[in-house]
Amino acid sequence: MKRFTRREIVISASVAAPALILPRIAHSAAAFPAKNIQFVIPYAPGGGFDIYVRVIAPVMEKYLPNKVSIIPINVAAGAGSRGVAQLYRAKPDGYTVGILNIPGMFILQQQQGAGAYDLSKFSWIGSMGEGERYVISVGSKSPLKTYADLKALSAKRPVKLSVTGPEGTAFAATMIGAQLLGLKTQLITGYKGSADYVVAAIRGDSDAVIATIPTTLRFVRGGTLRPLASFETHSSFPGIPDATTLGQPELDNISVERLIAAPPGLPVDIQNTLSTALAKALADPVVVKWAKENDLIMKPRTPQETARIIADQRAFFDKWKKYLVTG
Amino acid sequence: MLDMWLGGLQGLLHIDVLLFVLLGMVIGLVFGAIPGLGGTTAIALLMPLTYGMEPFTALALAGGVMGSVPMGGSITSILLNTPGTAPNAATCLDGHPLAQQGKAGLAIGAAGSANALGAIIGTVSVLAVLPIASDLVLLFGPPEFFLMGLFALAVVATTSHGKALRGLVAGGLGLMIAFVGYNDIAGGERFTFGVEYLWDGIHLVPALIGLFAVAEMIHLMIKGGSVAKSAAAVKITSMTSGLVETFRHWPTVLRGSFIGTTVGAIPGLGGTVVAFLSYSVTAQASKNPESFGKGNIQGVIAPEAAICAHDCSALIPTLTFGIPAGAEMAVFMGLLIIHGMQPGPLMLRDHQVEIYGLIWALTASCVLASFVGLLFVRPLSKITLLDSGILVPLVLSTALAGSFAIDMTIENVVVTAVFGVLGYMMMRYDYPRLMIVVALVLGGNIERNFHQSMLMGDGGWSVFFSRTISIILMIATVAVLLLPVFRGVLQQFHPRKVQAERGHS
């Protein structure tokens, strides 16, 4: 019964005008939520952010005080800025929430100007998992066996690193990471998506690649990629150097955060209801199993912790942004 | 290995799984036929429904959708000159002229059977190649992608016989439009005039809907009457005649399937390029190239066989490396991940049964959809007899709504309208639309891969000359460009022989 309603709504939401969405009124004592909640994903279906929401949102529904649906809506235009602007302008009533890519949104604002939204003013709900950290790797056929080999190469000539276009979060991670490691680099930019630029290193387009741990793990297990150094404080790959042993603790600040936000001015009780439901969803067996299969860490965050994350990331990003100025 | 094929097939042969393949097939047909919707939207919408399903069943459903979308798309291409999905745009070029001649039934029949055959050939090749697929994918890097793009442009350019200059103008315009938006290499946006929508470039599907559907409707509105000229002619066509045509042109089917399979396995080029490439190569190989664009049945068979074969082999880069070969595959990857299957090198090892089941489902759906399509050939052909007063508003509103529905942006509709006028002007002044489409699709790819090649080779050209496949591609491109010259020379020295050949065909 519930599933049927959701299908109807999802189909009408995506095929016809959004006006066709018929809010379903639930009868219950608690006032919120009284109708379906829209979950704005500022990217196209199929990407990482989309998948997180599509896995977690249906579980989050179960933990809301009333029986309503959470409906993912992809607003992909303008490299994500339209979706975020739409979320920012929506009524702060708890019926519109969204997922934000940090530092992706910083990069976007830097490229496009501050735009129609102020990231520090959003009402934060929490995050979908812990931020993903990075690792530098080479293809398994590469002559570089250790991090020392990579440093030696860098002393001779710039190390070629494959990476996405300058708008991507991977680009920022690669630029900042290479700076911190003191590598002399030449970037091969423009690859589409996270798998594409890692495969470029496997293929031999580039000497090495800086990618998130879940992505890297997938290829390391397949025997096509060899990690050389982890950006984590404590390496999750046995036997390779990490931020601590490299003497560069700041490497651990480079991450991708998937933060959940509502429009500015959300009443605190609604904010807590949503935040609690999200935290419970992250501990639900369905999500835990999925996270384990995909090497993700599902640690819940309170609204305050989330706000702190964004402030820390902002400070870190501002410190390094001079290396990210392009075109 | 054989037991794996059979294992996948066995998994599929359960009544509930088969029902989901069937359901996927019907949804795919409908979504394929409506311009702007296509497989991407269908799978995205079905995703939440699959949460409670077994992974295998979910894949069967997705396979069902993906298999039947090309058939649905070809129907609208032929009847209304409106590509149901982007790759079907190539089918418009000869499919619609056939409909105008009252041979819509023939064209749909041929499209359906070409689809089915293409899928079968594609499946067999993919099954054979899958164990070594990952090595194959790694053979193609930026220099090869760049040269592949150049090769495809050259093939298509030489198809516009006698209109070489107009072809170049259209191609140049397409390339210029393709460069709107983000600069993938250096960052920043170009030619966007401060419009946020243009940051992501001109979207392909709204542009195609404009170039074909809207342009055709403007044309029909001005001309008046109906698509097909006489009712008597429409009645003659039967579903079997199209079938027979496909089997008569088996070299075209084989060539199309071959192109579809090989190019599909290389990530990044996508179904639209494959369809146009197959179309152009077929026109090139024909002894009678002038008849293309005027209703040559081979112009329907070639792209349709290629599209279905491509859809099978496009699974290779998606599954083995997680590199989606287009929007549809990207959404499909999302579905895989939600069901706990991470595309990548381990996928082939850990989820063999699911993969082979998926391939079987896709093929089964492709074949089934063709039969369903064939059953409805007769009633569907009647659409071509509708008066323009009824047809034009219907198609225009569907086309514009479809364009809006892609990602709910009103700017898509503006793009469709602008390209509609452009498409009509190109029809009117006889500029080949083929070139603008191919340039539009390939422009960004060619530019990006060229820059990446130069970065790989430290700014030198040697990177193109030190790789085997890249050298082969260069030779092929030069050969394609010289072919018309050779033909011309041959014609000069043996005019009678060439003419006799042409007369014979």
Image: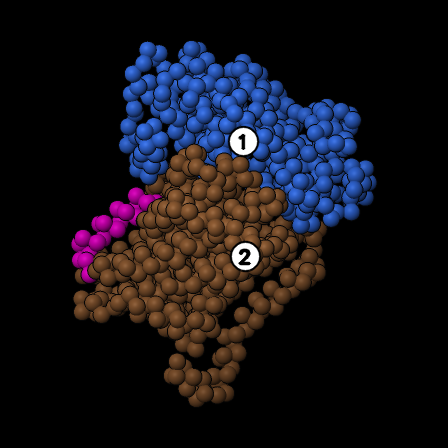
The quadrant in which residue A74 appears is top left
Task: Identify the colour of chain A in the image.
Answer: blue
Residue B435 vs residue A326: left or right? Answer: left
User: What kind of residue is marked 2?
Assistant: Leu
Chain under label 2?
B
At 22% from the left edge and 59% from the top edge, which residue is drawn? B379
Quadrant of the frame with the C terminus of chain B: bottom left
Q: Amino acid at mark 1?
A: Trp
- Residue B155: percent from the left, percent from the top? 50, 66
Find residue B49 and name its label: none
Residue underneath mark 1: A290
Residue A212 position in % (x across, y down): 63, 34
Q: Is residue B391 magenta?
A: yes
Q: Colour of chain B?
A: brown
Residue picked out by circle 2: B127
Give the CA separation, mark 1 to mark 2: 29 Å
> Which residue: 23% across, 64% down?
B228
Tell whether B455 sits left or right of B125.
right
